[in-house]
Structure formats: C-alpha cells, structure tokens
Amino acid sequence: MPDWRGVQALLDQGAAGGVAPHIVFLAWRAGAPAALMAAGQAQPDTVFDLASLTKPLATALVALHLELAGRLAWDDTLAQIMGSPPVPPAKAGITIRQLLTHAAGFPAWRPYHELLERQPPPMRPALLLAMLMNEPLAQPPGQAALYSDLGYLLLGLLLERIGQKPLPLLLLEAQAALGVEGPRFLAPGQTLIPLERIAPCGPLPGRPVIHGSVEDENAFALGGAAGHAGLFGTAGQVAAVMDALCRCLTGDGPWPAAAVARIFSLDTATPGSGRTPGFDTPSGPESAAGPNPPVGLVGHLGFTGVSLWWQPQANTGLVLLTNRVALGRDNDRIKAFRRAVHAAAWRAVEE
C-alpha cells in the first residue's frame, strides 16, 4: 500500500511556510482515487479558481464536443468560420487546431480588460474580437508553439459563435455528452456555491476582495467566462473529467477512442512543440511535474497555483490545487513546493 504521509507532511509544511493558505492534493491510480488530502484552511472539497486549467478542461473539451457533433472541424480556418468582415490576411489561415495547440502565433497576453471595462458588458465580446483581429502576431502561424492566453480568448469567442451559446452552457453540454459532472464557470456574485467553500484570491487594483469571482482580469471583464480562464472546481471534479476522457480511450465511454486520443496527442505539425490540443507535456528535469514523472504524461499549470498531470494510457494522475495568489501574485514559493510534492507523489503512486 502506498504511504502518503510524506506527501501530507509536505502539504502541511507548504501551508505553514507561505506557499498558500489553502492546499488540496489528489492522486488517481489506474482509474480510481488513491489519495485525497488537504492542508491549511482547505477541506478536501474546497473549490478553487482553476485559472488556465480552463484551457484543457473547458475550452478544448468544448472544441472536441462540437467536432464530434459535426459543428466544426479542427482544420477550419478563421476565414472559413468568420466570413464577413474579412479576416486580416496574416490570420486568415489560422486553424482551430493551431489555436488549441498554441501554434497560431498570438502573443502571450495583453491587458485588454483596460479597454473592455470602459464599455457596457454586452458590447465587450465584439470589442475583444476586434482587438484580437488587430493584434499583431508575434510569429507566423505554425512556426513554433508560443503559449498564449490571447489565442484561447479568441478560441472561446469562436466556439460561442459556432455553438450559438455562451461558453458556460457549451461546457455543460460537453460534460453531459461525456457523462461527467466537472468544474463550472462562475459569474461574478454567483451564489450557487457558498463562499466559505471557495478559496479566495487577490487582492488586485480596484478589486480589494476577490472571492468567488475569477482572478484573471481579462476573464473578469468578460463576465467570468473566457476561453483561457474562469473555471472553478474541486480536485475531485478535475479528476472526474480526466477519468472520463481516459475511459473513452479504452472504449468505456461515450466518445470514440480515436477522437479523444487526439486531445492527448502531441502537435507534430509544429516544429519543436511540446503541446497537445489543450495540454502541455513535461519540459525536462526542471519540469513542474517533478524530476521523476512517468512516461506519456500530459498536464497543465494555472496562474493561481493549480496544476494537473495525468498519464492517459494508465489513467493515473495528480491534481494539486492551491490559492498561492492569496498571498500576492509575486509569491513564487509554489515552484519548489510543486516539484517536491510531485516527486514524492509519483514515488508513492508507483509503490
């Protein structure tokens, strides 16, 4: 039997040592939960701002669902999807697949919220689309992988256009089709989840209390739901989505194995890419996944202090959720902490 006492000790040390006031860890082994523990002020079912875990767990999931429903193809281009007015020539050939794999060439980030917040909320998506269409690319599409919130912001808008519904509703449809109850988007002030169950973030300029609303400024300006951020959930809900996808790989799920395999497959069309349509892969010995991760791992990090690493073929993985930004955005204690927890956890999983 695996001994998780060392991992629990690391979690407790992290909470006491200023990594984050709320910490939850979950291990999944061969299709079943292996460990669930909390530290600091957290409970095992504490809800966290999942930040960029939104990309694989929501946006990529919706893109796969719409493809399976025949609503889009991942090789559709912006010119095909948007029609009139014409897409700028440099962006016309960008595909859904390139947006999913961070190969579209968009810069990493821009403070679009500064302009969006000056407009009434109903006008903000159209303004954001115009800004994205006018944003100079950092590199030609397909040249290399360049991690970009902007590409996923655009992807979220495109999926809403194709699906003809807001992203939160499209996500609920995708989860229902997959047969899973996963993380959700929360609109500002939403009361479906009691605040005491949600780990707080912040503060930020103009937002002295960030509790129950998305920390990311651009997502907040869009009403809490965007292609790159806005998802809230528990470690168990994160694991439930990964488990459902992995079960499809073995034929024990509603979606075809070959289709689901694509979400976990490396982008071989982009030179040097370590990305899949939604996920990242370990970057070497210094990876946040730890110095000893198993082969075939995919995962993702989130700015608020969350992470997910999974081995799809074995249906084994780790979820580590924290609210490290509650102690300030410059709190970087998560880096060494995350690697230490993952190193100990992979050893325990293999026992």
Image (cartoon, rainbow, N blue to C red):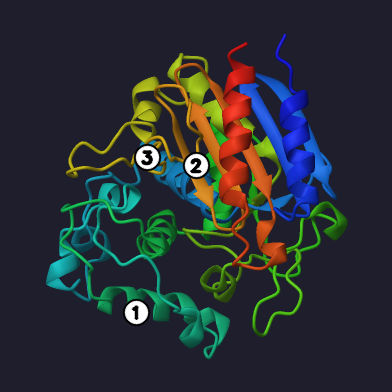
Sequence-wise first label, 1 or 3: 1
Label 1: which secondary element = helix
Q: Which residue is mark 2?
A: 288
Label 3: which secondary element = loop
Residue name at image x 57 percent, y 43 percent: 307
Quarter residue 21 falls in: bottom right
Question: Callout 3, which amino acid?
Answer: Ser
Percent across and percent down for residue 80 are 20, 58
55 relative position to 189: left or right: left
Query: Does any portion of residue 314 appear in the rendered image?
Result: yes
Quarter residue 91 falls in: bottom left
Percent across and percent down for residue 142 are 17, 52
Label 2: which secondary element = loop
Question: Callout 1, which amino acid?
Answer: Met
250 relative position to 265: left or right: right
Q: Nearer the viewer, residue 307 or 171?
A: 307
Q: Which residue is mark 3?
A: 283
The 10 Å Cα crowd at callout 3, few under 14, some 14 to 19, many 20 or more, is: few
Percent across and percent down for residue 165 are 50, 59
Q: CA distance from mark 3 to mark 2?
A: 8 Å
